[in-house]
Amino acid sequence: MPVRTVYRDIDTLTESVIPIYTSKGRGGGITLMEHFILNKSLLLEKEQDEILFSLQSLSATNYPQIDDILLKMSTLFQKK
């Protein structure tokens, strides 16, 4: 997956009111801000779909533990 696609997906998550934190260097990566709780009622169905699509894109890169997060978000949004 091109790096540009990952950056676009991160932007999509950020635009969907999900606070993303990135850190560079060894051991760095992309995480949610600590203590973040998603209120799904604030998200339109289209935004929920965009979030899931972004997570699926990260899954294609073998990003650590992304499948667990994707499963949780799919369950939260009641989409499988």
Image (cartoon, rainbow, N blue to C red):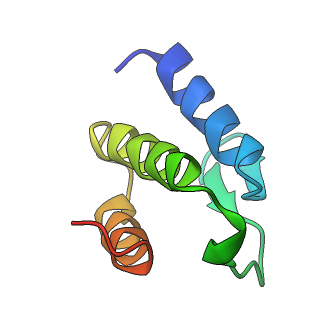
**In the image, residue 58 lies at what x, y percent?**
40, 42
Identify the residue at image location x=59%, y=54%. 27
**In the image, residue 10 lies at what x, y percent?**
63, 38
**In the image, residue 11 lies at what x, y percent?**
69, 33
Q: Where 12 sits versus 59, above or below? A: above
Task: Locate residue 62: give its quadrant.
Answer: top left
**On the rendered structure, is 28 left or right of 66?**
right
Q: Which sits in the foreground, 26 or 33?
A: 33
Residue 28 seen from this side: no
**On the rendered structure, is 8 left or right of 3?**
right
Residue 32 seen from this side: yes
Q: Where 80 sits versus 34, above or below? A: above
**On the rendered structure, is 12 left or right of 49?**
right
Quadrant for the N terminus, please. top left
Q: How many marks?
A: 0
**In the image, residue 18 lies at what x, y percent?**
72, 58
Q: Which sits in the foreground, 78 or 10?
A: 78
Quadrant for the C terminus, please. bottom left
